[in-house]
Amino acid sequence: MACKACNGTEIEHDAAQGMSYCTGCGEVCEENTIVSEVTFGEAASGAAVVQGSFVRAGQTRANMTGPGRFGSGQESREMTLYNSRRRIQQLTTALHLSEHYIDTAQRYFQLALNMQITRGRRAMYVSAACLYIV
């Protein structure tokens, strides 16, 4: 890998911070590197099981399900955002709108969620209103 800024080849990898940077100019080459390896473990019954988690785009952390953990493992806010995106996609599909409308309406929904406008209102109505103002 070469640095895009100075074309230097001395790239330092910092696994603790999850980034790579050029030692010549200090340019950050990679950020938030995620390991995409498949690892296997052994269950109590002796069966091989896949270890790891799937992290969707925009998700703040990995799902933490498994022994000793309760619920779906996702935060309520993440589930709300995921469900709103799904509802907005359903509406745009029914109305034959482009992907641009989904992304913009989702940003409006996230803004409404941050400002607590969604409290006490049906999520489908808020999603539809966000799509309407786009």
Image (cartoon, helix red, strand yellow):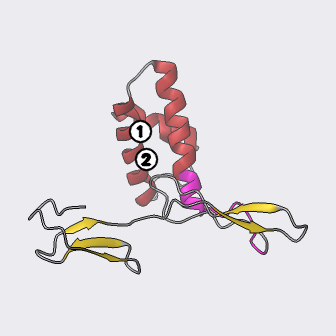
Q: In the picture provided, is 134 more to the left or to the right than 43? A: left
Disc 1 crowd rating (10 Å Cα; few below 14, some 14-19, many 20+) is many
Q: Position of residue 19 (x, y in %)?
A: 33, 71
Magenta region includes residue 73:
yes
Q: Position of residue 131 (x, y in %)?
A: 41, 34
Quarter of the C terminus within the rendering: top left
Q: How many marks?
A: 2
Image-quadrant location for residue 48:
bottom right
Magenta region includes residue 29:
no
Residue 123, placed above or below residue 29: above
Disc 2 crowd rating (10 Å Cα; few below 14, some 14-19, many 20+) is many
Residue 45, placed above or below residue 90: below
Under circle 2, the secondary element is helix
For the point 38% across and 40% down, the residue is 103
Q: Position of residue 29 (x, y in %)?
A: 24, 65
Residue behind mark 1: 130
Marks 2 and 1 in Cβ contact (< 8 Å)? yes
Residue behind mark 2: 109
Quarter of the N terminus within the rendering: bottom left
Residue 52, placed above or below residue 21: above
Question: Magenta region: which residues?
Answer: 68-80
Q: In the picture provided, is 49 more to the left or to the right than 108? A: right
